[in-house]
Amino acid sequence: MIKIYDTMTRSLRDFVPLEAGKVKMYVCGPTVYNYIHVGNARSAVAFDTIRRYFEYRGFEVDYISNFTDVDDKIINRAKEEGISPKEVADKYIAAFLADVAQLGVKPASQNPRVMNFMEQIIEFIKVLVDKGFAYESQGDVYFRVEKSHNYAKLANKSLEDLVQGASGRTDEETERKENPLDFALWKRAKSGEIFWDSPWGAGRPGWHIECSVMATEILGDTIDIHGGGADLEFPHHTNEIAQSEAKTGRTFANYWMHNGFVNIDNVKMSKSLGNFITVHDALEIIDGQVLRFFFASQHYRKPINFTEKGVADAETNLKYLKNTYEQTFATDVDTEPLEALLDKFTTVMDEDFNTANGITVVFEIARWINSGNYNAEVKEKFRQVLEVFGIVFAEEVLDADIEALIEERQAARAAKDFATADRIREELASKGIKLLDTKDGVRWTRD
């Protein structure tokens, strides 16, 4: 049985879906005002791998990941570029989709956008106001945190601690609130900003409300899994829970999953430190599949250290798997050892999607294959395991002249003309083709 580390309970729990054989999964996507950074990419890859493993284990996954296309950062970028907020969003959504495609991330079942759910957002807020969980103040609408049951339980914080931390706030927005902790559901429009009409006047939604609305509209009042980066635990996911459960009276998500941060040379990535790396730039010098394989080398919940050596090691290891996948078949293979290795793979991956241990087993499978155990059946099962990590190798065919050289060398060896055979081996090596003579014939790999 698959076990998930649930952030809410801080424990490893058996995964029991709402509906047998199906997974309803919502993962917070990017705010589309710029190219995504490697931290965003790690989250996209981590949850894509989790989705792929569910599918490997036979589940049908409804995978929803949103785009925040209404936000202060988008409005500011629109002013800088002299285009509309929608044009900014469209531009960076296209860039996001192109970047994650290079990382082997499967298209989501749906990518909802805030602008397309404005009517539902306004209706959601109206329900909260009618139930007394929210109030209007000078054109803004705020959620009453004190009315929320066990607020901030996800982040393991108490309301008392949060109140103490918020004491002394005197900014203009705080003066409009009943409580400094109350958060915005609707923001009144400022001059020149994009806005929508509402019962509280012209404005736009707050950040947190959008995910609650899109998740429940598409997947239902209760979903199986809600995921995102560790930085979203508080306040974003905390506020999602508060407003969603206040509206529906039901548990919002049964499992909460959060991926760890990306550090750059052991330092947390930050724009202020100048170590901020966009995926758009990284893909100029790093193959997308290599970057993805690098992310898979560490368990999704743990921080990962982005270094040149780590990426180089990922490239070397991926090349080994590629050469393993592309080798020629053996004549006689006992697949029983493979079944034991596949059982071992599911055992380690069932333990909260432990990709680090899963990849260790993948290399055990590769070593077994490289000892002369490869046929069509083995290749297909090896392919299925590799696809869990988004590794897809295109079938590579040798050029006719390369094949001719290999056949010529084989003929020379059969005639015991080893000088010619060695000369051809060296010529092939200069073209990036390495040969290995086995009992089942010659195998080749490409550097």
Image (cartoon, grey):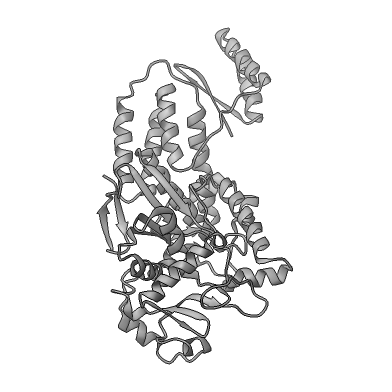
Q: Say above or below: 318 vs 172.
A: above
Res. 188 image quadrant? bottom right
Res. 90 image quadrant? bottom right
Residue at left offset 51%, top offset 34%: 322
User: For this view, does 151 lie left or right of residue 41?
Assistant: left
Query: Could you tell me residue 16's position as x and y percent?
Result: 27, 49
User: For this view, does 382 lie left or right of residue 289?
Assistant: left
Residue at left offset 38%, top offset 85%: 165
Q: How many numbered markers are drawn?
A: 0
In-front residue for pair 174/417: 174
User: For this view, does 401 lie left or right of residue 103?
Assistant: right
Q: Locate the C terminus and report the quarter of the image it occupies.
A: top right
Query: Is residue 120 shown to the viewer in this render?
Result: yes
Query: Could you tell me residue 153's position as x and y percent?
Result: 31, 71
Res. 250 image quadrant? bottom left
Query: Could you tell me residue 49's position as x and y percent?
Result: 43, 47
In-front residue for pair 423/339: 339
In-front residue for pair 426/16: 16
Query: Is residue 359 shown to the viewer in this render?
Result: no
In-front residue for pair 191/409: 191
Query: Could you tell me residue 286's position as x and y percent?
Result: 60, 49
Q: Residue furthest right?
A: 82
Q: Say above or below: 149 vs 371.
A: below
Q: Locate the N terminus and report the quarter of the image it occupies.
A: top left
